[in-house]
Image (spheres, helix red, strand yellow):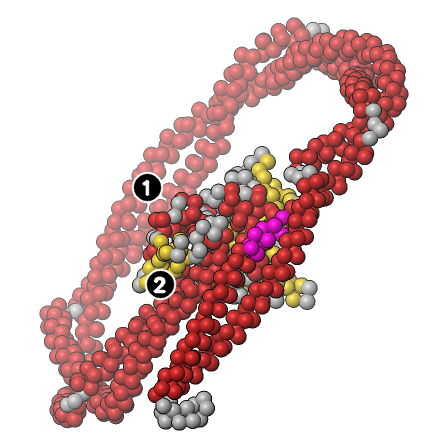
Amino acid sequence: MKIEKILIRDFRSHEYTRVSFTEGINLIIGQNGSGKSSLLDAILVGLYWPTRPKDLKKDSFLRVGGKSSELTIFFEKDGVKYQIHRNITRGLAHVKYLENGKWSTLEVNQKRVRDWMERLIPYDVFVNAIYIRQGEIDAILESDESREKIVRKVLGLDRYENAYKNLLEVRKTIESRIRGIEAYLESMKNIDSMIKEAEEELRATLKALNDISPKIPLLKKEVQGIEEELKELDSLAGEINGLTSLEKEKEGTLKEIKAKIEGLISSLEERRKRLEELERREKELRGIEPQAREYITLSEFYEEFRKKKEKSEKVIRGYEGQIQGIEERIKELEKKEKEIVKLDGKIRRIEGELEELKTAAEEYNEAMRIHNSLKSLEERSRLSEEEIEKLEKEIERARERRERILREIDEINERRGELRNAIREKSRATLELKKARGKCPVCGAKLTENHKKKLLGEYSVELKKYEEELKDLDEKEKKLRQELFEVEKTLKRERELVKEKELLKQKKELREKLEGLDIEELEKKARRYEELSQERGRLLGELGKLREEVERKAAFEKKREYLKRKIEGLNDELRSYEEKLGELGFGSMDELRARVEELKPIYEQYLKLQPAVERLPEERRKMRDEERRLRSLKEREKHISRELREIRGKLEQTRERYSRERHESLRKEHIEKREELARMEEEQKHLMEKKEQLMRRIEELRAEKDNIELKKGELENLRKARERVQELREKVRQYKNILKEDSLARVGEYASEIFEELSEEKYSGITVKALENKVVLGVIYNGEERDLSFLSGGERIALGLAFRLALSLYLAGEIPLLIMDEPTPYLDEERRRRLVDIMERYLRRIPQVIIVSHDEELKDAADRAIRVRLENGVSKIEEVEVS
């Protein structure tokens, strides 16, 4: 897997962030709290949300002030490019793949996208083999047990442990199945006698069924005859009950109608009296109606004219005040027009002088830039020109010496191989000679004990000689490698040399540019240029404000004319009201008000009479309705009386045809016969069901008899399967232990190399021991093994980092990606510098590495660096130049 880029919107402190990653070592640097670790959290959430990682909470994702947290991860796996997009806030997600230049959708929905990613790269593999999160190095140092858990996850040993446990469950399932079949065979050992008993019980059931079946039809016929006669008597009894109820109902209805008739007669008499009073009031209202209407017309006009006059006079006074203020403002603006002309002339004079000083100011700024650049280069430069020449010669001599040392080591290795072959051959010859009897395997002559003893002595001398030479070669190689280490340290300064030479070249170029410039004169002109620029800016600001104000003069004049037109319009409206007053026959508002006061008592009397007149039509309608209802009730009274006489006659006839005693006798007999019939039918049903059950039972027993042999064969196969599962389980256990020991040995080799460098070769290696549920670490100091308590605090951190890096390097062939979050927080300065060398030497074996750190020194080992910084609470990123 290789991550190509990530897009982040409103996630933690990131508003919108786009980060691309390349092959090699990608470094993300920044201060604590800048949002750099949030980039790694975004990768985890983007790939495996919503159920993982569990320690990241949705409530903490949305940026303060943000609308919706969105993540998009672009990555490549096995030659195919993918993108996963998630909108965390809205719960949306999709995964797409690139085919023929177009993106095609694979899955949608948060859970389905997560499940697809789990199939591609399981979450446990990602967080244990690819991603070293903060705190994992500490967990390695906590205890042997916690270290064993991390090793088990990273190396994939959990899979074999799970297989070992699952095979136990398989074995238990097989054993449970065996016990079930054995119990089944035990329960079926008397199957022949069980079949015979069931057949005898079936014959007895068939005999009882044949005895009861003919009796049921005869009893059903007898019950049917009783039911027909009982049905006729039930009908007569129902008819009598219905007529009796109807008689009572009609009697009640007739009584109710008579009461309503009496109430309506009384109500009609009262309503006639109310109508006479209302008609009298109507006549009075018609007499004063003309004066009331005149009052309405005059009072409305009076109020309208009065309000209009008060409002218009008030508005006119306001308009006249505005016009006075506008005229004063126009006079002020005419004065400012004259000020504008003066400012224009002053600005033109300043601009002329600025044009003369512009070139000198630009030259001064360029000189200051060169001066600052030169100062920065001086600060970055660590070596003088003489020291650079000296270092260059040292590196050249070191390169030549390294070539000679490597040739000597190759010659030693070649000679060592020859000696080891010779030792093997001589050891084999010694073994053959010891086994030889009668004839010498070397010369073919007769082999005596003296001759055999002599040859063995010669062989022993030669072997000792070879071993001494090997020992000398080892000592010589050790010295050469020590010297090679020192030479390599010198050669590592080659990058520093290139950097210093480039700095020296840049400093010379900048000094040449500064020669011949009169800095003091340029500074004086630049200062004058700056002062004039500020003065010009200030004057332009004043000029702009004056012009803005003067531009409003035309608007003030326009508004003045508008207000004058509004005053004239209001005066015209008041004149039209005065003309209408004359048309109504009044010379003034006082005359109009006197007439209104005169008509007011008449209008008030008119208002009192109006409700009575309005009620008159309703009262007349109600009277007509009550008269109509009275006629209807009298008609209904006659009809109900006639129906009641008919019901009473029919009831008397029905009672003569009905016998209560016969009815009760038949009902009792019907119940007894029905109970007897139900009992017989139930017994018949029970016998039929028993017959069916016995027939099925016999059939099942015969089938079980055939199945017993099959079960015996299945039992034999299951017993064999149990043995095979147990054998496989033991092989898985053995393989897991072998894999663990082998992988830890390889990891120990990597960890030893890294730890030696981090500890400045104070320690000559790391020991890794795999025990039950433990991984025990130790260190080699002066040829002796020591436990971790021997280490200082800084050395423990260095050991933890070395061991965790070794785990990832062990998997480098399988996992092409490594992500590290803050690997250096507890390392001292020297170990951080050594970590740079380790990254260059070891981590480049992994195709893509992403590291998050606040340590600037790691830039020296990075192929690409990205800085994250916080501006106003929002994370920003920028490319950083690397060496």
What secondary structure is marked by label 2?
Answer: strand
Residue in the image at 88% along x and 23% along y? 356
Question: Does the stretch in magenta take in 621?
Answer: no
What residue type is disc 2 on? Ala
Confirm whether residue 89 shows in the render. no
Front in this rendered view, residue 754 or 340: 754
Residue in the image at 38% along x and 91% along y? 447
Q: Which residues are magenta?
A: 483-493
Front in this rendered view, residue 407 or 370: 407
Please state if 217 lies on the left or on the right of 347 as rendered: left
| Vertical position of residue 872 compared to residue 757: above or below | above
- Screen quadrant of the N terminus: bottom right
Which residue is label 2 attached to? 770
Residue 281: x and y in percent read 49, 22
What residue type is disc 1 on? Ile
Q: Which numbered disc, 2 or 1, marks the residue that appears first in the sequence?
A: 1
Residue in the image at 38% along x and 73% along y? 735
Which residue is label 1 attached to? 261
Q: Picture quarter containing residue 357?
A: top right
Question: Does the stretch in magenta take in 489?
Answer: yes
